[in-house]
Image (cartoon, coloured by chain):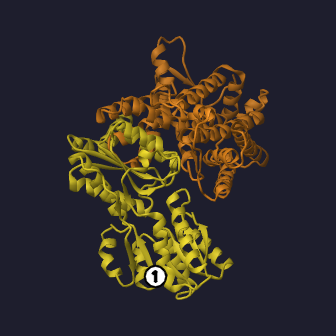
Chain colours: A orange, B yellow
Amino acid sequence: MVANSEEIRPVRGRGFGLLAWLFAVQELGVLVAGVIIAAGFSYLSPQFFTEASAGSILASAVQFGVVGLGVTVLMIAGEFDISVASVYSLCPLVMASLWINHGFHVIVALGLALLLAIAVGLANGLATLFLGIPSFIITLATALFWAGVSLNLTGGYPISFFGKSAVMNWLGAADFGRSQISVSVLWLVGIAIILSVVLRMTATGNWIFASGGDGRAARAMGVPVGGVKLACFMLSSLLAAFTGIIQFGSFGSATPTQGSDLALTAIVVAVVGGGSLLGGRGSIIGALLASVVLGMAYTGLVLSGVSTTWFQSFVGFLLLFAVIINLRMASVGARLGVIRKS
Amino acid sequence: MRLKGLLAAAAIALVGATTAPDVASAQGKLKFYVNFIGGPEIQFFAVVKRGVEEAGKDLGVEAIYSAPKCCDINLQAQLLKSDVAANPNGIAVEFNDPKALSKPIVDALDAKIPVILVNTQNFADETDPRIKALAYVGQDEFHSGAKVGAGLLPSLKKGTRVVCQNPGPAQIVQTVRCDGLKKFLEEKLSASVDTLVNTASTPAQGLAVLDGYMRSHPDTTAIVSLNPETGTIACQWVEKNDKQGKVFLGGYDISPAVLDCIKRGITSFTLVQQAYAQGYLSVVNLYLKSKYGMTPSNIDTGTLLVTKENAAEFQPVVDSGRGG
């Protein structure tokens, strides 16, 4: 694997196996935060550990997580995507409009909406790579553009689907058996497993880490950095669209104003999960945990009788807490000699 | 390491500071949620929230305003799921979307949690009959459009053009209001009523949107604004362009700025649906149901037309932060 400046590894052969692992694990911050939050809310609300609240927590986790996983991969490759929030609202609207208003088959409408998302990601990637403008700026511009398109597509009005559809059930309308847990959780878990395997066990994963860690060195070693980044842009956009489509499946309504804060929340998921804003570092498992922690916070505040207007403050604090824990543990581990920053 | 300790303490403090008093006070208290689509970043919702919280204090119950940042219907539905999971003594729901909000409401009813609707009852044909039968606290939106139209009637000529400024099409209530106004003015005056979607996030942008419309439709003789934010913009436009007495203004809800425009004679009137009362009376309705088993009542809160003549009477309500 191509080395990168952000990578943290346990030092072998020092007899500190467990300790080294503990200091090196990128997900430590979010794990600690998750345990504190779960303990806090279960103490404050007897309803916190019930099936109904699990359904609510996981529904939120799916929304934060699927889009967050795509952004995490892109950030590992060293790029940002601010347009995910706009794609999140645009693509389900396109699907709903084609299907409900224009009579397309639901699968065709779904496929076209996802193709649109891939095209948006491709455009973001090409513009970033060929114009040499930071992806933050490019995707900010496209975010505004696509938000306007969404508003104009329906004049700002929502599109709702009534009735039964197997596709909508599989997207999220159905629950597991008689539980209150939506099947959309399967999408989050499935996507997380696939991405985790790709990142950790394949050459493609190595290329992604290398492209974000030190693009020049990676290129010198034959990594197709441009192609890797392009693919990551498309993945980020695709998962943002799919998140919106899952929401459409779960609740049956697509609105152009949905998800306005999602771009920042997705970055929070990536960073709280152990990712670096500088690229070359990040964890799918960490991002998955971060999305569950955000879901716990969102539902936990409600169950504890606290106004959700505190949610943003909570997310801000969580972000700082997890990042500082991660950084301090890494530097303390390095000082003790149980891990190495390479 | 000390920093880490501080952070851990602060994390616990954050959870504690925001929740401990509520939990302590909740012991043995009735608990109600009032679920809306927007939070206090929108003035109207801020006043509803105040009504909810003050009713909670007055009645000695835990009354919680539950809403996402305006206006994400799926987030509202997700929050409603959490509200139901909390198994409270009652829930009031702003029924914005007949699809997204139905399932959590049915889940609540199945769990024997009393539910009422507040502010909006946007039913579809497919809406569960149990939801259609729920008690409602708020104004009759379609008829409110006619009420606003009637307020404008004396100032308008036959065949004139009127524009309805809609600040949030995702809130179906806004569309229903414009539809009611359109139907009334078409019948009475054969007027053409346009809808102007004005979702601008700043007053300057909002003013530019309205200005663009008014310049391209110079025959417009009345502007109806569906919330105080767009009502203030309309007032500013009339003042800037010296159109007082030529372009008439009416609207919904009230703020200090709108009341000032009414007192100065720039805005003819505003229909006040009493946001504070909607929040407050929702909690009262649920309280009576939980405490005494009384059936929740339908309450029409939108009965007051504030004009130059009665503006002074309404001033104390606005000054106390309970106008909305």
SS category of the residue bearing label 1: loop
The part of the image, by quadrant, that contains residue A320 is top left
Q: Residue at x 63, y 36 (%)?
A: A70
Decide which of B99, A110 is in the foreground and name it.
B99
Q: Position of residue B104 (x, y in %)?
A: 44, 41
Between residue B108 and residue B234, name the one nearer to us: B108
Residue at the disc numbered 1: B268
Q: A291 or B81: nearer the eye?
A: B81
Relative to A305, A57 lies left or right: right
Kindly tell me whether residue A317 is visible in this rendering: no
Residue A91 left/right relative to A48: right
Q: Amino acid at mark 1?
A: Ser
The mark total stands at: 1
| Picture layout, residue A272 above or below residue B62 | above
Subunit ID for the residue under disc 1: B
Q: Position of residue B9 (x, y in %)?
A: 32, 37
Q: Residues within 10 Å of mark 1 (few under 14, many from 20)?
A: many
Residue shown at the point (21%, 47%) measured from the top left: B291
The residue located at (24%, 43%) in the rendering is B26
Quadrant location of the C terminus of chain A? top right
Image coordinates of residue B36 in percent, x first then y, are 42, 52
Quarter-of-image position of residue A50: top left
Q: Is residue B105 left or right of residue A175?
A: left
- Which of the 4 image quadrants contains residue B309? bottom left
Q: Residue at x 23, y 54 (%)?
A: B57
> Which quarter of the figure is the N terminus of chain A placed in?
top right
Is residue B297 visible from the viewing direction of this image? yes
